Amino acid sequence: MVQQVTKGIKITVDTSFEGTLYKDYKIQYAFGYQVTIENQSKDAVQLNARHWTILDALNHVETVSGEGVIGKKPIIRPGESHVYTSGCLLNSPFGAMLGFYEMINFSSSKKFFVDIPRFKLSAPFAIN
């Protein structure tokens, strides 16, 4: 588990290895991750967009950007949290992800960015 606080927004990420599958005649490694976004600030905020960098051990880099998270743009009031689960496929049994969320502070109407800390993805059978 990794955690980081940016501008009063605490991000916690837990990861899991989900298994392997074949896609386009290649083996793929499936990983899941659960993100908890906790508002420790005094203002209500809304998550509007996400930006991810996904890395694997074969030096493949993928960037993913989009609105909200899993089809939602949650409003998170002070002291509340939003939890969601998602996943990714890698070409190797090791990798990492990092990124940031674009958010709006409802009190000031200003956009701000919240860092998503770098977290490792690793298949247990490949760990020495």
Image: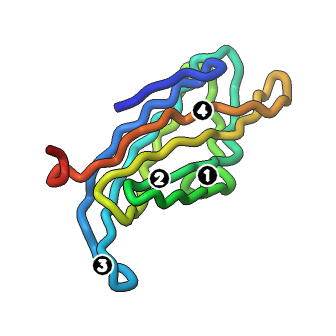
**Discs 4, 3 touching: Cβ within 8 Å:** no
Q: CA distance from mark 4 to mark 3?
A: 33 Å
Image depth: mark 2 or mark 4 in front: 2
Q: CA distance from mark 3 to mark 1?
A: 30 Å
The amino acid pointed to by label 2 is Leu
Image depth: mark 3 or mark 1 in front: 3
In the displayed structure image, the side of residue 112 where residue 126 appears, left or right: left
Q: CA distance from mark 1 to mark 2?
A: 25 Å
Of callouts 4 and 3, which one flags the residue occurring earlier in the amino acid sequence? 3
The amino acid pointed to by label 3 is Tyr
Q: Which mark is residue 10?
A: none
Q: Could you tell me which secondary element the residue under label 1 belongs to?
A: loop
Q: Which mark is residue 72?
A: 1
Q: Is residue 113 above or below residue 98?
A: above
The residue carrying mark 3 is 22
The residue carrying mark 4 is 115
Of callouts 2 and 4, which one flags the residue occurring earlier in the amino acid sequence? 2
Q: CA distance from mark 3 to mark 2?
A: 19 Å
In the displayed structure image, the side of residue 67 where residue 26 appears, left or right: left
Q: Position of residue 38 (x, y in %)?
A: 52, 27
Q: Quadrant of residue 76?
A: top right
Q: Could you tell me which secondary element the residue under label 3 belongs to?
A: strand
The amino acid pointed to by label 1 is Lys
Which residue is at the front of the view, 90 or 30? Answer: 90
Of callouts 1 and 2, which one flags the residue occurring earlier in the amino acid sequence? 2
Q: Could you tell me which secondary element the residue under label 4 belongs to?
A: strand
Task: Give the farthest residue toward the right.
Answer: 109
Number of marks present in the image shown: 4
The residue carrying mark 2 is 55
The amino acid pointed to by label 4 is Asp
Q: Residue at x 18, y 46 (%)?
A: 127
